[in-house]
Image: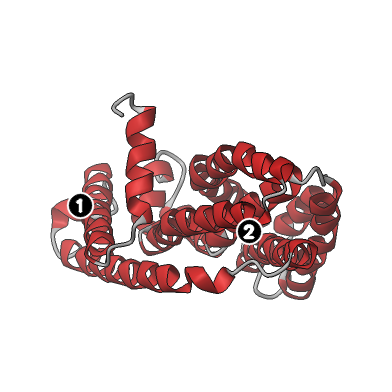
Amino acid sequence: MGLIFLDQRLASKTPGGGAANYTAMRLATTLIQFPVGLVAAALSFAVLPTLTEHVRAGNTERFKDTLLLGFRIGLLLMIPAAAGLIVLREPIVALLFQHHNYSQQDAARTAIALQNYAYQLPFVALDQLLIAAFYARKNTIIPVVVGMISILGYLAVALPFWSTIGMPALAFANTVQNSVHAIILLILLRMAIGHLRVREIIPTVLKILVATATMVTIAWGAQIILGHFKVFSLDRLLGQFLTVAIAGGLAVLVYLGVVLLLRIEEIGLVKDAVMAKLGRK
């Protein structure tokens, strides 16, 4: 609670309009929480029972296999989510918030905050899985202690730059805090159970990055092309909706296409999970 109060206090005093900056950070946080809850939290809850079962059986290798599978699925979903929010931040924010008294300048602030928050999403996916790994080992203290230590990451960015860079620095400070939390947990888990074989996921991560880069290129190019037509103007609700729908839709299709072309096996597991939720096993 103390850090939340400090973040709010610093945001309210940032240059360029403290109250508006705080509102931008709050709205951007709301957008970031959507993929965090939909992917990261859901994935950690899904793997926790299996991790706990492996711990009870004393099967460390199966424990690592499950955790690595979670890493691959988490990154498969969260890397493009982060990239998509960044490249489509302006039309997304305009569509959702730029109405009534919420001006273009307010939307621009929120888009900047969203960009700086979005960088943390892949790390948050890993972090949630690592927290589940410690919980499965009946160790709830370490994640809390690491949470306190990772506050230093926030302070290292926020305190020197809140009065100069302003609101973007505070948003990025939160990204540093959560990313540091994941990195420290990864190091501590390795110390506890030995080599995690993280290198095994590198080929998958590289394929994900290729697919994401292709997706971003298409989404960025689509926005430029659509911007030449008045109907897609971000000054109007219809233009905002059409830009998000067309550019975002193309981005999703391209990402899925490249993922299938590169034969990233984890996409099949995601499909099966979605179908199971829909009752179409």
Q: Residue at x 67, y 50 (%)?
A: 59
Left or right for 111, reference 16: left
Residue tagged 2: 17
Q: Position of residue 223 (x, y in %)?
A: 24, 63
Q: Earlier in the sequence, mark 1 or mark 2?
A: 2
**Colour setting:** secondary structure
Label 1 or label 2, whichever lies nearer to me, is 1
Name the quadrant containing residue 196: bottom right
Amino acid marked by disc 2:
Gly
Q: Is residue 213 visible?
A: yes
> Looking at the picture, how far across and down is residue 102, in whole percent?
46, 45
Task: Name the residue carrying label 1.
Answer: 246
Q: CA distance from mark 1 to mark 2?
A: 34 Å
From what the image shows, is residue 41 above or below residue 85? above
* Residue at left offset 54%, top offset 51%: 28
Q: Secondary structure at mark 2?
A: loop
Q: Is residue 16 above or below residue 7?
A: below
Compare residues 104 and 193 and report the one nearer the observer: 193
Between residues 21 and 78, which one lies in front from this camera angle?
Answer: 78
Q: Return the residue found at the far top.
A: 279
- Residue drawn 59% across and 44% down? 44
Task: Determine whether, in the image, residue 37 is placed left or right of residue 243.
Answer: right
Viewer-nearest residue: 105 or 4: 4
Q: Residue at x 37, y 46 (%)?
A: 269
For the image, the number of numbered tags is 2
Locate residue 156, reporting x and y percent. 78, 72
Q: Judging from the image, what secondary structure is the residue with disc 1 in? A: helix
Answer few, some or many: residues within 10 Å of disc 2's Cα (few below 14, many 20 plus, some between 14 and 19): few
